[in-house]
Image (tube, grey):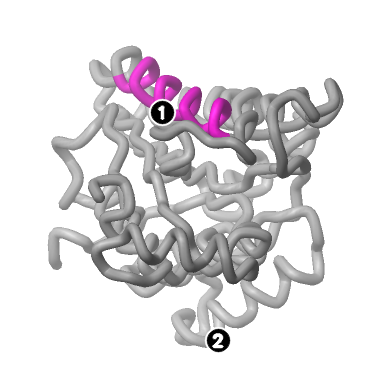
Amino acid sequence: MTLFDMTGKVAVITGSSRGIGRAIAERMAEHGAKVVISSRKKEACDEVAKAINDTYGKGKQVALAVPANISTKDDLQHLVEETNRAFGKIDTLVCNAASNPYYGPQAGISDDQFRKILDNNIVANTWLINFVVPQMIERKDGTVTIVSSIGGLKGSTVLGAYAISKAADMQLARNLACEYGKHNVRVNCIAPGLIKTDFARALWENPDTLKASTARSPLLRIGEPDEIAGAAVFLASKAGSFTTGQTIVVDGGATIS
């Protein structure tokens, strides 16, 4: 047993067929948790679940694939129901999936694009949390982690609506931490900096943007998905048992320089 042991825990991670979500699922499985892989595409979910089962299962199922579109409330309810059916409970929820269909000045965003960002990055998180938390309250044990962004801590000329949604996620975590603390349910955020994922490709693939980002960072580089996973394991395990309502920044020092 270690402070980071997750043996016997069941974790649902949205957006976990690739990038940060996949890294979190893999590391939680490595630390003993059963994990539920969820994103829109069934084939991608199945592939990741199989890889985790092959690596950590030792002949048992430790990963389950349940496709879900975060913009559809029924999909999220089905995700919770299927997890409960297969594994009997949910101890940890990681709201990682998000949308950002627009890159540019705030004045140029369409109403539909703005609504999609707010709905998928804030409202959908609230739906899913509301589906999961009642069983945590009943057991008086559980954790929720929302993957936010350092965009929610800074101004932006090109990621305005996305940054607004990520700042709102931080406040959502603070509010829910206050509501659920008496039930021993902890709610936190992780705020990654620029990470080498497909989701952030528009930023790190642009040489000028990459140069500007790394020049300001004390570590002089962008991050890898696996470098976010440790914070997620910390928050979901005994190691983080006195941490709630917080936003843990994992950005190579970009916001302090």
Residue 46 sits above or below residue 119 on the image: below
Query: Residue 52, position in %: x, y?
Result: 54, 77
User: Which mark, by number, is residue 43?
Assistant: none
Q: Can you see residue 166?
A: yes
Q: Nearer the viewer, residue 110 or 225?
A: 110
Callouts 2 and 1 close, C-beta under 8 Å: no
Q: Secondary structure at mark 1?
A: helix
Which residue is at 84% across, 21% downward?
111
Specify the principal SS of the magenta part: helix
Q: Is residue 253 left or right of residue 106?
A: left
Residue highlighted by disc 2:
54
User: Which mark, by number, is residue 170?
Assistant: 1
Q: Earlier in the sequence, mark 2 or mark 1?
A: 2
Query: Residue 231, position in %: x, y?
Result: 30, 55
Amino acid type, callout 2: Asp
Q: Secondary structure at mark 2?
A: helix
- Magenta residue span: 163-177
Per the image, is 172 magenta? Answer: yes
Q: Can you see residue 78?
A: no
Amino acid type, callout 1: Met
Q: Nearer the viewer, residue 154 or 49?
A: 154
Query: Residue 38, position in %: x, y?
Result: 66, 55
